[in-house]
Amino acid sequence: MIQALFIFILAGLCEIGGGYLVWLWLREDRPPIYGVAGGIILVLYGVVATFQPAGFGRVYAAYGGIFIALSVLWAWWVDGFKPDRYDLLGAAVALIGAGIIFFAPRS
């Protein structure tokens, strides 16, 4: 379980961080190296996600909930966005859903 969570978090940081660098390049007029670095990191996101033991559909469905929570945290820590209780509640619901999808016992 710890390994799966680590892989989800690493994949999320790659996707959000890579996307953020591309955003900075295109929307905030940063040098093209930001876009190149962002693209490379986004490719790493695709690679990191393959380390999960479950199949593609379940991994990506569960990852969606983790991505939501990580996006709220990223916006808070990096952009200075202050999440309100509904942002936090939505992220918590998404995480609960991700946990059910990925970690529920199956027969």
Image (tube, rainbow, N blue to C red):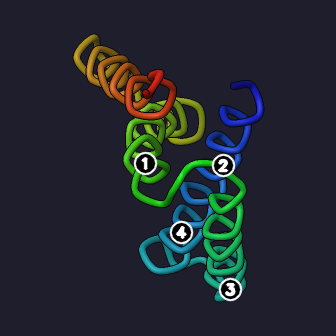
Which part of the image, by quadrant, shows the C terminus?
A: top left
**Secondary structure of the residue carrying numbered label 3:** helix
The extreme front residue here reads: 107
- Cα separation, mark 3 vs mark 2, equals 30 Å
- Cα separation, mark 4 vs mark 3, equals 11 Å
Please provide percent x and percent y for residue 66. Answer: 47, 36
The one nearer the camera, 103 or 63, is 103
- Cα separation, mark 4 vs mark 1, equals 31 Å
Residue at horizontal 64 percent and vertical 74 percent from the top: 38
The residue type indicated by label 1 comes to Arg
Q: Circles 4 and 1: CB distance less than 8 Å?
A: no
Q: Dot 1, crowdedness within 10 Å: few (<14), some or many (≥20)?
A: few
The residue type indicated by label 2 comes to Pro
Task: Answer with the quarter of the image where residue 95 lies.
Answer: top left
Q: Is 78 displayed left or right of 75 in the figure? A: right
Name the residue tied to disc 2.
53
Name the residue tied to disc 3.
36
Total numbered labels: 4
On residue 58, the disc is 1
